[in-house]
Image (cartoon, grey):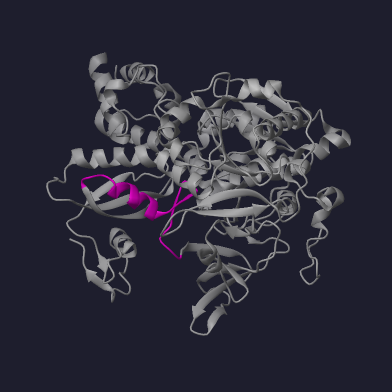
Amino acid sequence: MTVDSNSPDPWKEARALIDAPGGSVNIAHEAVDRHVAQGHGATVAMLWLGKDGSRRPLSYGALSDASARMANVLTAHGLTKGDSVFALMGRVPDLYITALGTLKAGMVFTPLFSAFGPEPIQTRMEIGSANVLVTTAQLYRRKIAAWRDQIPSLKLVLILGDEAPEGCVALDPAMAAASPSFETVHTEPEDPALIHFTSGTTGKPKGAVHVHNAVVYHAFSGRHALDLTPGTIYWCTADPGWVTGTSYGIIAPLVNRVTMIVDEAEFDLDRWYATVQNEKVEVWYSAPTAIRMMMRSGAEAAAPYDFSSLRFLASVGEPLNPEAVIWSEKVFGQPFHDNWWQTETGGVMIANRPGMAVRPGSMGKPMPGIEAGIVEHTDAGLEPLGTGKVGELALRPGWPSMMRAYLHEQARYDKCFADGWYLSGDLAMRDADGYFWFVGRADDLIKTSGHLIGPFEVESALIEHPAVAEAGVIGIPDETAGEVVKAYVTLNPGYQPDATLEKELRGHARKKLGPAVAPREVIFRTTLPKTRSGKIMRRLLKARELGLPEGDISTLETDES
Amino acid sequence: MTHADLRAAFLDTLCNVAPDIDPATVEDDEHIQDDLGLDSMDVLNLVTALHEILGVDIPEADYPQIATPAQAVAYLAKRLG
């Protein structure tokens, strides 16, 4: 397949991968129902592996019925097209059914990472004006119940299982009573389908809006970046609470009619190796942190397993170090192929694609139909840079899965574009052969275990503690996680900087933010480096932490002590 | 070290890695990830800290054997014994 960038409709051929009956595009139809209509209802869509060792296959037919029931449950509660459905749960079948049922009903789906603490959850539900939350009784009690009434838009809380706390509805009986047939709500290609939240350097998280037409690119990139073909046994280890786990852990695989493995459990070395071997995984999409955890235990730990089923391995989330690429080829017989994209792009933009020679340490080359450049900000506007120069990685907008808005944040959205480019915020360079290499973030965002963390959200939680006067949060390099979150704080009068308080602050942050976002270390300072306008200079904290040049410090007013 | 000492040392280390946990409420059969909310980076930090405090090097393949306080105490006792 080709994408002719000079054509007025470059994605015409890619659209052949979807059905789009009567010009309507609905992700759930493309992912599930059309396969059933075409006689593939008995094919296993999803093989779910429970933490307890259980193994539950769900066919495309079963997924179609269950998502129809979910759509009926939602509409029976008076919800209509465009309403906002949030999911907060682990990787259980109900999560996938909720996603597809929501899309079928023409509503907008937002997955949240279940390990988030109450604050990130509340902030995102407020920004997204959540109408429905689907979650578990335990998560509801621990993280939601205390502030539920503060979300006026919230009309319905569905609780997995047979029983629900007061004010909530139990999902299982509602599903059992609902009809397994539902006429998919007519959605236009540009109707909103998904909102994924991403962190900002300053201010609140941003809700990136994606439309149903994104499915064209999910289908295309699933095929051409990951080699997903009908019948492929595919395992994406990402959680749908992050964009990879939705784009490539739900939509792209189902649209390409693969059998996807969903593992409820977290990383566990032997469980993972056994899963690849026993389920005969052919395509495996994972992340550098997990790959480095495998490396830590050495080739010996992998030796007893048979990995001959593997055909293609890919990695995303942060740059995959060359050692990990080389190690994986030795151990699995296939190298992990790094690729690059963002919440905003909705799909893989730059990749070491199947059939391409992997260049270890590089993110690969732009996908067909994607134009990428390295640009520099000058007084005259953006200046494209040549080979070997470091600048901001930018993309020519126009592919189907590009975000269409940040919710209620037109100005921040507009700031992402200039001179006909989308600006990624990542620094990179292109080599003479056209391969792109990640250099760093152009801003203060922290990449830890493949997740993008906004320092502002962490600082805000820290200063809510009565002891903390000011906080500056940075990412410091870590051999396993890429970066880990580290906080510098100053204290209010009457508080002693000691180990007990350090522990208390970490505990406070974990309760508010969850372990993925909270700092792993808190350092006490008397003052923090600040600009004249009072902004904490995170860049300077980081340069000093790493022993790097301090750069331009002309705006420094108060120094650190 | 007695089992009680080991249990205390394990809980102390656990709650230092994850200070949101109140050691007084931890049950012996609670799973450190599923019930107590540790993520995989926390588990790595826990293993590193246990190594520093008790001198026990825990290989990756043995992580499932420290998944609950009860299992961890039995495992550490065996390794130290």
Instruction: Give the residue at x 39% y 16%.
Output: B29
Instruction: Give the residue at x 69% y 38%.
Output: A100
What percent of the width, then of the height, locates residue A259? 73, 34
What percent of the width, then of the height, locates residue A243? 58, 47
Q: Is residue A505 left or right of residue A281?
A: left
**Residue A459 falls within the magenta-colored stretch:** yes
Instruction: Give the residue at x 36% y 40%.
Output: A512
Q: In this view, does A362 lie to the left or right of A508?
A: right
Instruction: Give the residue at x 35% y 55%.
Output: A474
Farthest-out residue, bottom = A380
Q: Is residue B4 left or right of residue A333?
A: left
Span shown in magenta: A442-467
Closest to the observer, A488 or A199: A199
Camera sees residue A303: no
What percent of the width, then of the height, locates residue A411? 52, 66
> Dividing the image into 4 quarters, which one contains the N terminus of chain B?
top left
Q: Is residue B65 left or right of residue A334?
A: left
Residue A548 vertical position relative to residue B21 in the rendered view, above or below: below
Q: How many labels does the image show?
A: 0
What percent of the width, then of the height, locates residue B14? 31, 29
Question: Where is residue A504, by image quadrant?
Answer: top left
**Residue A24 falls within the magenta-colored stretch:** no
Camera sees residue A253: yes
> Dividing the image into 4 quarters, which one contains the C terminus of chain B?
top left
Residue A6 vertical position relative to residue A262 in the rendered view, above or below: below
Closest to the observer, A147 or A274: A147
Closest to the observer, A341 or A468: A468
Closest to the observer, A15 or B49: A15
